[in-house]
Amino acid sequence: MPREGILVEKPYERMTREQVEQIHQASIEILSDPGLMSFNREAAEIFDGKGAEVTPVSPSDHPCWLVRIPEKVVIEALDSAPKTVKLGARNPENMLILDGEEPRVRFITGSETNIWLDVDFPTYVKKSDPATEIQVPEFHPRRGTVADLCKSAHVCEHLETVDGYIRTVNIQDRDITEENKDVNKYFASLNNNTKHFMSGLTSLKQLDNVVNMAKIIVGGEEELRENPIISFITCLVKSPLQFVEDTTDTFIEICRRGLPLVVSSSPQAGSTAPIKEAGIMAQINAEVLAGITLSQLVNKGTPVIYGSVPVRARMDTLGDSYGAVETSQYNVDCVQMARFYRIPNYSTAGVCDTKTPGQQASIERLFSDILVTLSGPQYLHCAYGLLDCNSVFCLLQAVLDDAHFQMIKFFLRPPRIDETEIAEVLKQIREVVTTPQKLYISYIRKVMRSGQLSPPYPFEGDGETDSVFKIAYDRMQELLEKPVEHIDKATTAKIFQEIPGLLPRLNVYEERR
């Protein structure tokens, strides 16, 4: 059985049906006028052969083409794109079935940050009372490593609410190069986590090696088609309305292999997209539709996911503001657009602007976590451990986020109200009002045993001090001590024999000799 996720019975929607259709129509108009600039020759040729109007742009520093896509081509592509996308896993019980028409949410990690944030707890002594000691968290940023990625995958394997794993940190060891980065980040993640794994590619040259690794793990090409344990994030669109040369090459090759992939667009309202909600929504929807259309022109039936990472510009620096209220509004709107097309949605939440865990991080993260979850995206990523506009990953924060999502999942349970329940509570009320105490305490035990009551906050302190970070840190250490179901020894040996560039230290069986 696949992972259940959480069904949102009545998704929160900001736009009316009429407004959704207006955004759709505006996006269709954008794709035909002004169209998109393609810096990728092959994409331009594909569109040119399928009914689009393609015109070379000159003069230009780089070869590029203006691509105007007719509505008919877009609609045909939307019709052929699968409405259900299957994301496999090493452990079949961790499989994800994303139905574009069902608002069933899965919570996913991400994204690839350059900075790993360590934490320790030095002890400080109060000057006026040396007998009083406190432990204060101190955070230390540094470059991420392969060992960090393994550690993150390990902990996320055991976080209850994590349904799938996106690589959380950019591996920057001295022996990691552009040629070997992809195979090492895929193996490190797959070997320490049995959930579905999604990532981008650093180099198109490594696509075959990554795919062959997955084939070895699952048993062959047909087995990988049936159980796609890996999928890809492809940022082929640079806002506003430009197909990038190298990532579009990667996108096209993944489509040809028929593996699941995300069309991800991340415009910034105020700089690379209009500041008004209608404007950024019309543009991001046009950009995603262009990617979906290309996927189906390359290989009809390619399992593609509608990806949205819209943000608002800060008005003081013009940097990203993931914690802005508008960022959540845009994401909720994108969920509605994806549902309009009945295509699964890769959405964004759990994001914030602050550099370290704390009050601002909690407020901004929970705000987007709750609201975007309520809108019912099928694949909600970025939701664990990310700080500083998705440039920093903190494993301690990921553990905190898991507790927050447990609360959200409990809140979204459907109410238990039916004739049987009403009859039982009426009986209780009639019995209690006749007693001297008039209390319902004797009825609590049965409900507690049924799991109908939410548990206390797992990082609750002693009531005198705020010990959230220290308790969460201890929980993180407990999870790191739990075993991980590594890829078996024979399969690992075959992977290291057939896939070039893997770091020997990642072979746990070699290390145990």
Image: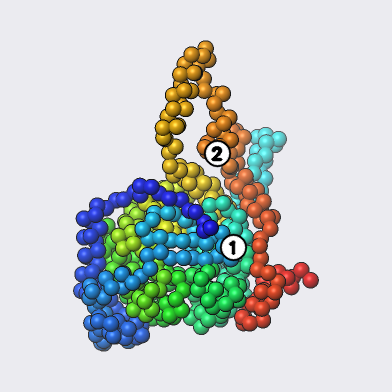
Q: Is residue 176 left or right of residue 81?
A: right
On the image, the x and y values in percent for residue 489 come to 70, 71
Q: Is residue 104 visible?
A: yes
Relative depth, front residue between 132 and 280:
280
Question: SS at mark 2?
Answer: loop
Q: Is residue 243 visible?
A: no
Q: CA distance from mark 1 to mark 2?
A: 26 Å
Up-down: is 449 above or below 504?
Answer: above
The residue at 46%/65% (across/down) is: 86
Relative depth, front residue between 494 and 322:
494
- Crowd tier of the residue under label 1, counting other residues whose Cα lies within 10 Å: few below 14, some 14–19, many 20 or above: some
Q: Residue furthest right?
A: 513
Relative depth, front residue between 233 and 437:
437
Q: Is residue 214 left or right of residue 85?
A: right
The residue at 44%/76% (across/down) is: 258
Residue that label 1 marks = 91
Amino acid at circle 2: Gly
- Crowd tier of the residue under label 2, counting other residues whose Cα lies within 10 Å: few below 14, some 14–19, many 20 or above: few
Dot label at residue 451: 2
Q: Are marks 1 and 2 in contact (CB under 8 Å)?
A: no
Q: Quadrant of residue 30?
A: bottom left
Q: Quadrant of residue 33?
A: bottom left
Q: Exactly how many numbered labels are in the figure?
A: 2
Question: SS at mark 1?
Answer: loop
Amino acid at circle 1: Asn
The quadrant the C terminus occupies is bottom right
On the image, the x and y values in percent for residue 131 come to 71, 35
Q: Is residue 117 left or right of residue 51?
A: right
